Structures are given as structure tokens and as C-alpha cells.
Image: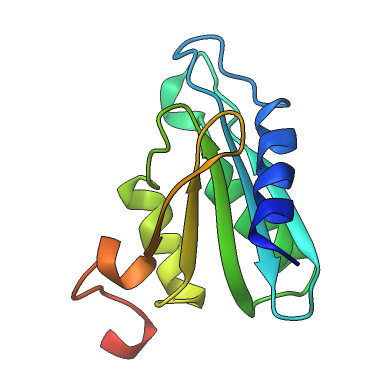
Amino acid sequence: MSNDELLRKAVAARARAYSPYSKFAVGAALLCADGEVFLGCNVENASYGLTICAERNAVFAAVAAGRRDFAMLALSVSGAGTPCGACRQVLNEFAPRLPILLGDEDGKLRGEVSLDQLLPNAFGPGSL
């Protein structure tokens, strides 16, 4: 799958976000090694701590479907932001060097980074 296709899927996921409080919609498209893609969007809640980020939404959907071998993540975020700390930690559990495409709300690639750059010296399964 091309980077552009994966970014388009992230944009489509972003369109489904439920973000009435922050007005900050995020879409994620998680590419598995077998080529299957899992989508996630952020879903906010009036009890803010119950909110789920797009990245974790996609990871949990993939794991629930039996996938744990992740090849790439594409994000659609206003301003092309990066995953939050909680999402970085969850992603690290499965793919410490995961390439991440940083796309804006229109799916234009604004940058690319690897998870180990965002979370250096990470705590993970090997730390136990």
C-alpha cells in the first residue's frame, strides 16, 4: 500500500471522530504486515479520562482481530501532530521502530518519524 493510500484512509477515519469538547479530530490508519489496515478515530467523552485516542483505537481493533505485527501508522491531524505519550507507549508494546506518517487534515504528508525517535529509551516488554 502506498503512503498516499494509507494517509487517505487516515483522513477517512478522521471524518468519523467524535470530538465535541476539544474540536481536535484525529484519524489513524494502522498498516499490518499482512497488508490489512485498521482504522481508528478519537472518541471523546464528557468524563474526559474516558476519551480514547485514534492511535490506540486502531491498535486495539487490530489486536482484537488477531493482528500484532504492525508495519506503519498514518495520522491525519490538524497541523500534522504526533501521537500523545500514552499512544506512544501502547504502540511501543508492539512495534518499537514503527514508521509514522504525519499527515494534515487533508492527507498531505507533513513529515515522517519513527516511534523510537518519539519515545527514546522506552520501557517495554524487554524491560521486564
Q: Residue drawn at (55%, 24%), measured in percent from left and top?
A: 25
Query: What is the x, y in percent for residue 12?
Result: 75, 35
Query: What is the x, y in percent for residue 114?
Result: 38, 68
- Considering only vertical position in the picture, is 49 above or below 8? above
Q: Residue drawn at (56%, 18%), measured in percent from left and top?
A: 19
The answer to which of 125 and 41 lies nearer the viewer is 41
Residue 128 appearing in the image: no
* Colouring mode (rainbow / by chain / secondary structure / one colour): rainbow
76 with respect to 97 (left or right) = right
7 with respect to 118 (left or right) = right
Query: What is the x, y in percent for residue 80?
Result: 42, 37
Residue 21 appearing in the image: yes
The answer to which of 39 and 112 lies nearer the viewer is 112
Query: What is the x, y in percent for residue 29?
Result: 66, 52
Q: Residue drawn at (69%, 54%), measured in percent from left and top?
A: 6
Residue 27 figure quarter: top right
- Considering only vertical position in the picture, is 124 above or below 25? below
Q: Residue drawn at (46%, 26%), measured in percent from left and top?
A: 78
Total residue callouts: 0
- Considering only vertical position in the picture, is 46 above or below 104? above
Residue 123 figure quarter: bottom left
